[in-house]
Amino acid sequence: MFLAKRIIPCLDVKAGRTVKGVNFENLRDAGDIVELAGRYSDEGADELVFLDITASSDHRGTRLEWVERVARQVRIPFTVGGGISSERDVEALLKKGADKVSVNSSVLKDPGLIDRLAAAFGKQCIVVAVDACRDGEKWRVYSHGGRVATDRELFSWVKEAEGRGAGEILFTSMDHDGTHQGFACEVTGRVADLVNIPVIASGGAGCPEDFHEALTRGKADAVLAAGVFHFGQVRIPELKCFLKEKGIVVR
């Protein structure tokens, strides 16, 4: 549907540093946010995602000074998420250099916020992030950085988000996050079949073949990863060469 596939590094930010954990827990330091952002921009990443992972649980907005520092270092589209709850929040982030925003907890509480943000800034600006894990036969959606279970079910929620004006879905399997065992390709593929907007797969990258699987069997339009990039297990130039050799169109 969307021809060129995208490779997107993610900076999970806590206290001004990039961190990475397993299944959203046991966070460890992964480096300076500005240095990593600049490196990924130089290495050929297609986009960058910056998530202030404690903003919602701390009941505050994203730290604008962090966003501004990163924006100065990158020459690629830059998505920011964390604690966004109003049109004013989005406007402030865009002024500091963000190209898109990622919303999660706030729109689970107030789904109409998706409609309002899409109307104010355009669908192309609004990424709805969905963190979910398997709960029996269902996939339960979580808010506040994976800390709070909701009564939302993954498949109905992504469909509703699209209908309200989401421009993209960023789906993270909490069960796979940080495990380096591969993406949740089957469920990602089901999400991709349900919606007519780009789906970004997240959670589980461990090697180049995992990215290939997410883009083919998982039907993702883009793949997001963090730890494998931060700690040097996978480098973006080599990953793109690998995908091209496999017949995947990348930018």
Image (cartoon, rainbow, N blue to C red):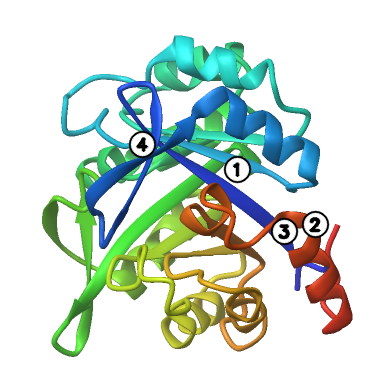
Q: Are marks 4 and 2 in contact (CB under 8 Å)?
A: no
Q: Which mark is residue 152?
A: none
State whether residue 96 is above or below residue 186. Answer: above
Residue occupied by mark 2 = 237
Residue type at numbered disc 1: Lys
Q: Earlier in the sequence, mark 3 or mark 4?
A: 3
Q: Residue at x 21, y 83 (%)?
A: 138
- Cα separation, mark 4 vs mark 2, equals 38 Å
- Cα separation, mark 1 vs mark 2, equals 30 Å
Q: Residue at x 86, y 57 (%)?
A: 251
* Element on which disc 1 rests: helix
- Cα separation, mark 3 vs mark 4, equals 27 Å
Residue type at numbered disc 4: Leu
Q: Which residue is at the front of the view, 146 or 230?
A: 230
Residue 199 placement, left or right of 132: right
Q: Residues within 10 Å of mark 3 (few under 14, many from 20)?
A: many
State whether residue 211 is above or below residue 54. Answer: below
Closer to viewer: mark 4 or mark 2: 2
Q: Are marks 1 and 2 in contact (CB under 8 Å)?
A: no
* Element on which disc 3 rests: strand
Q: Residue at x 65, y 74 (%)?
A: 208
Q: Earlier in the sequence, mark 3 or mark 1?
A: 3
Residue 165: x and y in percent read 51, 48
Q: Residues within 10 Å of mark 4 (few under 14, many from 20)?
A: some
Q: Residues within 10 Å of mark 1 (few under 14, many from 20)?
A: some
Q: Residue at x 69, y 57 (%)?
A: 235
Q: Earlier in the sequence, mark 1 or mark 2?
A: 1
Residue occupied by mark 1 = 123
Q: Which mark is residue 6?
A: 3
Q: Earlier in the sequence, mark 4 or mark 1?
A: 4
